[in-house]
Amino acid sequence: MYKTKLFKLSFVAAFFALAFNGTAQINTPAPSPAGSVSATVGLTEIEINYSRPQMKGRKIFGDGDSFLVPNGQLWRAGANAGTTIKFSDAVKIAGNDLAAGEYLFLATPGASEWEVVFYSDVALGGNMAAYDDSKAALKAKVKSGKLTETVSTLTYNVADIGENSENANIQLAWENTVVNIPVQVSFDETVMKAIAENTVVNPRNLMTAARYYLSAGKDLNQALEWVNTYLATGENSKQFWNVHAKAQILAKMGNKKEAIKVANESKAAAKAYPDGDFGYIKRNDDLIASLK
């Protein structure tokens, strides 16, 4: 009996020891912690994942072996497994076409110009010795610049998104160097297809379509037709925010007299709205003032 109990106790102790050894671990900060950044440019999702090395007193970019990343040497553009960039749609990089997908981002620094590479085989990771030039989906030359303040940790960003949402920069900054890689997206064809399909099944989309035509400088007569169709339905004419959009379209068409008339209608409806005017009294006043 004693031996049986001793065996059972030993078995239980061994089990817990194995379980503890299998799950317990000590976590410490990574020398190059993971980082990610994402942004929507137009309708295109851009996602960057990378490991972030720090300067730690080292010289980063320059000529010669005393620099961590010497000029003229292909670099994984990050630490560990390198940097990946994913595009949900086809884009243009520095004017060159690049298909949608995920790429390993590589770079060869230079004194004032870098060569960047979007590499199709992300499994390469940080193994630059296995680089195969035939797998470079796109190469482009871009200018580098100098920063007035030091960036101690490698940092990526999607910066300088244009007012028309058609362009941006993928930005790399480290030490006193910044590199901007121009990205251009296209969404007009997608939007136009959606307008054709969805204004038929949902009349509320007429306003979305009209606003897009207004912002994109497309056929304003068509935009005005859509707005008039929408506002003539039910009590939609009480929606002063959409009446204001009609005034904007008329103003852009050069019909100042009618634009002022419609802006005043929008302003009156905004004043009468029990839940507030949402700033449309001022918007209409500003529009009217710009037309006089």
Image (spheres, helix red, strand yellow):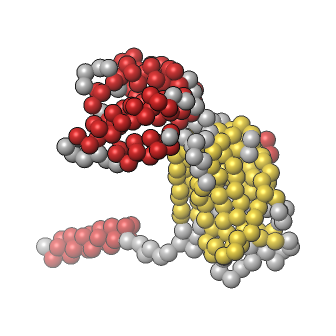
- Name the outermost residue toward the left: 1
Q: Is residue 16 left or right of residue 2?
A: right
Looking at the picture, tell me which residue is in the foreground, 242 or 56: 242
Q: Is residue 98 left or right of residue 244?
A: right
Question: Residue 153's spot in the image, x, y percent?
Answer: 61, 72
Residue at the (43%, 21%) spot, across then down: 226
Above or below 240: residue 37: below
Q: Does residue 208 show up?
A: no
Looking at the picture, tell me which residue is in the foreground, 231 or 50: 231
Residue at the (47%, 30%) spot, across then down: 257
Above or below 235: residue 115: below
Question: Residue 18's spot in the image, x, y percent?
Answer: 35, 69
Above or below 281: residue 187: above
Question: Residue 289's spot in the image, x, y percent?
Answer: 47, 44
Question: Residue 187's spot in the image, x, y percent?
Answer: 57, 33
- Name the outermost residue toward the bottom: 57
**Viewport quadrant of the N terminus:** bottom left
In which quarter of the view is residue 178 placed?
Answer: bottom right
Residue at the (74%, 45%) spot, across then down: 94
Looking at the picture, tell me which residue is in the foreground, 116 or 195: 195
Q: Is residue 115 left or right of residue 240?
A: right
Looking at the rendered structure, the number of numbered marks drawn on it comes to 0
Q: Does residue 235 show up?
A: yes
Q: Is residue 264 left or right of residue 250?
A: left
Residue at the (28%, 36%) spot, across then down: 269
